[in-house]
Amino acid sequence: MQSVQIDYAGKLDVASGNNREANGYKSFIHQNEAQIALTNQILSQPEGAFSGLLVIPTGGGKTFVAAEWLLKNWIDKNKKLLWIAHRHELLEQAFVTFRKNAYSNLLQHKKSLCYRIVSGQHDKSLHIKQHDDILIASKDSLNQGIGYLIQNWIEANNLQELFLVIDEAHHATAKTYRKLINELKNRIRHLKILGLTATPFRTAEKEKGLLSKIFPNDIVYKSDLRTLISRGILSDPIFEEKATEWQAANVLTDEDFANIQKFDLPENIKVLLATQKERNNQIVDHYFADYNKDKKYGQLLVFALNIDHAIALSALFNDKGKPYGINADFIVSDIKDA
């Protein structure tokens, strides 16, 4: 097993050098175009509020584009950043991106920066400190501890300017998001909001209207999936369906079905699916079917539902892969308090 260790809060020392060179990152056209668009539209309006969307397909580097731009154009100017999402994995992904890109080519005026991750699985809102430069938080934890956010951070710093990033911004129409956004708007004069999404438009007309109200500056930059595939940045997907014969109707509620249609798989359903032994075996057996004949799939990356699911699938791949000399491993987050 490999694990990625993430502290709840702490200090990131700025490394000397260039972030892209140090990480071996390629410079992609759409990422550079996106950052130019952010500069032109946001920095051209230093006074007042701004709220727009950055639309890049999954795998195109939305988090990297935003984090790199913010480090250079916001954090380096000693301004505060609040990054919110609705899933713990997104919070950790954001933190890792900031940690990997804290280099002197972006942060020319800072030797270090302070961060804090706030969620049900990380730190608590009551521990928010005045000196925190970057708050990466779940919207539920902030709503529940809004008083600490206001007292310990907004009022303590007399914040008149704040940058708010909403990851998977197509969810921003939810009441919990709107409540938090309105609270910040009422308290911070120059609030900049950037929504990150691969799917900017919801199916319901009502939600489309709400999204345009939350992001009145519309789309800052958009890159479509076909463009990134044609440039060789993303692979052209080949979809195969595998019927598992699992009867969902017996356990799913109408609300569950509604969430799934919006590409939100409820946590209780993730747990249920992850523990379906027959379904897990079907996944692994599908890979090994006719393996000696054509080795159809080769090296494989599996996105599991949760940690338990990753462990279970890894064990099955190792067990059933022995005759073929195939080894499997899994990578999960290992959270510890700083």
Image: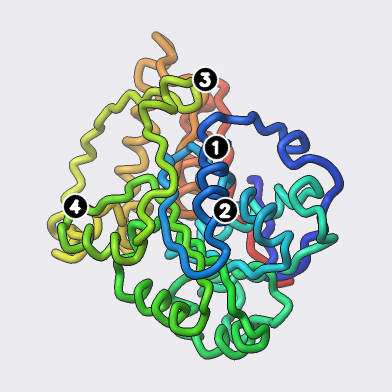
Whole-angstrom CA distance, mark 4 to mark 3, is 46 Å
Quarter residue 218 falls in: bottom left
Instruction: Tell me the mark number nearer the camera, choosing from 2 and 1.
Output: 1
Amino acid at circle 4: Thr
Q: Dot 3, crowdedness within 10 Å: few (<14), some or many (≥20)? A: few
Residue 247 drawn at (x, y percent): 16, 50
Residue 25 visible in rendering: yes
Residue for badge 2: 93
State whether residue 22 is above or below residue 48: above
Instruction: Tell me the mark number nearer the camera, choosing from 4 and 2.
Output: 4
Whole-angstrom CA distance, mark 4 to mark 1, is 27 Å
Going from the N terminus, do you reach mark 2 or mark 1 first?
Answer: 1
SS class, disc 3 = helix
Residue for badge 1: 31
Going from the N terminus, do you reach mark 4 or mark 1 first?
Answer: 1
Residue 109 drawn at (x, y percent): 82, 59
Residue 40 drawn at (x, y percent): 54, 48
Residue for badge 4: 203
At 50% from the left edge and 70% from the top edge, which residue is drawn?
48
Disc count in the image?
Answer: 4
Amino acid at circle 3: Tyr
Whole-angstrom CA distance, mark 2 to mark 3, is 34 Å
| The disc label shown at residue 190, or none | none
At 24% from the left edge and 54% from the top edge, which residue is drawn?
202
